């Protein structure tokens, strides 16, 4: 558990960080629609690389959206291993846990800016505003769908199938001008897929040798044969 500092602002800061900047992101996404309908204030905070946003077991006081950067949510197992549950990229909403405490820890993968709103305000608005309730339900359902897909990936796919699934997901979420820039390192990928660092590196090298992808750098990937990856994923 982490001690929280109470500040006399409209939104209580979840940790001790610089004062929030004025919101500058256009209100065009679902998170903004929910906040506007609920009449709650969205505040921006910036976290440094590997800095904790909230910890496992802390109260679920806020709902978050990534503005810039990337976030990983994970759980440390009893033997010290880390299981990453999800990667949250710009536009993604996280922190909507079902209970009153967070079951996972959230950390910034790179220097990251997030928006946050008071969960209590959203829940109160959902009780009287159908649109807010529907949008919150949609976000929750999306999270459950991802959790189900991730469970299937961990339990029923081979190492190469896992890597193929991951690359297709990141291609859909990140690729620009044909190139995929991964914010996460290979160890992160391994902890997400339930694989070792060596297995991830070996799979990427094998796919490169087969001409399925080109490794421009450790985190810059160009996919040459998406159909081959899709066949592996299927």
Image (cartoon, rainbow, N blue to C red):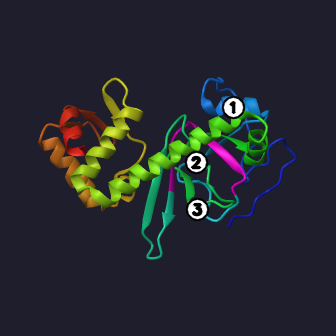
**Element at label 3:** loop
| In this rendering, the label closer to the viewer, 3 or 1 | 1
Point out the tag, 3 or 2, that comes first from the N-terminus: 2
The residue where tag 2 is placed is: 48
Residue 22 makes an appearance in the image: no
User: Is residue 78 toward the left or the right of residue 229 in the image?
Assistant: right
Q: Quadrant of the N terminus?
A: bottom right
Point out the tag, 3 or 1, that comes first from the N-terminus: 3
Q: At x 15% / y 48%, what residue is drawn?
A: 206
Instruction: Give the quarter of the image for residue 23.
Output: top right
| In this rendering, the label closer to the viewer, 1 or 2 | 1
Q: CA distance from mark 3 to mark 2?
A: 22 Å
> Is 22 covered by the magenta stretch?
no
Q: CA distance from mark 3 to mark 1?
A: 27 Å
Instruction: Give the quarter of the image for residue 100.
Output: bottom right
The residue where tag 3 is placed is: 103
* Residue that lies at the very extreme toward the left in this rendered image: 210
The residue where tag 1 is placed is: 131
Q: CA distance from mark 1 to mark 2?
A: 34 Å
Q: At x 41% / y 34%, what residue is drawn?
A: 173
Task: State the image coordinates of residue 7 (x, y, percent, origin top left).
Answer: 84, 50
Q: Quadrant of the C terminus?
A: top left
Q: At x 34% / y 35%, what residue is drawn?
A: 171
């Amino acid at each position: 558990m982490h001690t929280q500092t109470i500040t006399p602002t409209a939104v209580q800061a979840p940790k001790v960080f610089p004062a929030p900047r004025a919101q500058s992101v256009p209100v065009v996404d679902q998170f903004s629609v929910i906040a506007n309908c609920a009449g709650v204030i969205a505040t921006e905070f910036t976290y440094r690389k590997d800095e904790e946003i909230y910890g496992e077991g802390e109260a679920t006081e806020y709902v978050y959206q990534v503005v810039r950067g990337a976030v990983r949510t994970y759980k440390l197992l009893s033997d010290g291993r880390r299981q990453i549950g999800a990667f949250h990229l710009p536009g993604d909403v996280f922190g909507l846990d079902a209970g009153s405490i967070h079951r996972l820890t959230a950390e910034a993968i790179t220097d990251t800016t997030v928006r946050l709103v008071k969960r209590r305000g959203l829940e109160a608005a959902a009780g009287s505003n159908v649109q807010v309730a529907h949008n919150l339900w949609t976000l929750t359902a999306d999270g459950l769908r991802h959790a189900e897909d991730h469970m299937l990936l961990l339990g029923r796919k081979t190492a190469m199938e896992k890597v193929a699934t991951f690359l297709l997901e990141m291609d859909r979420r990140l690729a620009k001008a044909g190139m995929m820039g991964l914010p996460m390192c290979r160890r992160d990928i391994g902890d997400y897929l339930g694989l070792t660092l060596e297995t991830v590196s070996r799979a990427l090298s094998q796919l490169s040798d087969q001409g399925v992808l080109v490794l421009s750098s450790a985190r810059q990937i160009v996919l040459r044969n998406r159909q081959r990856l899709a066949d592996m994923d299927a």
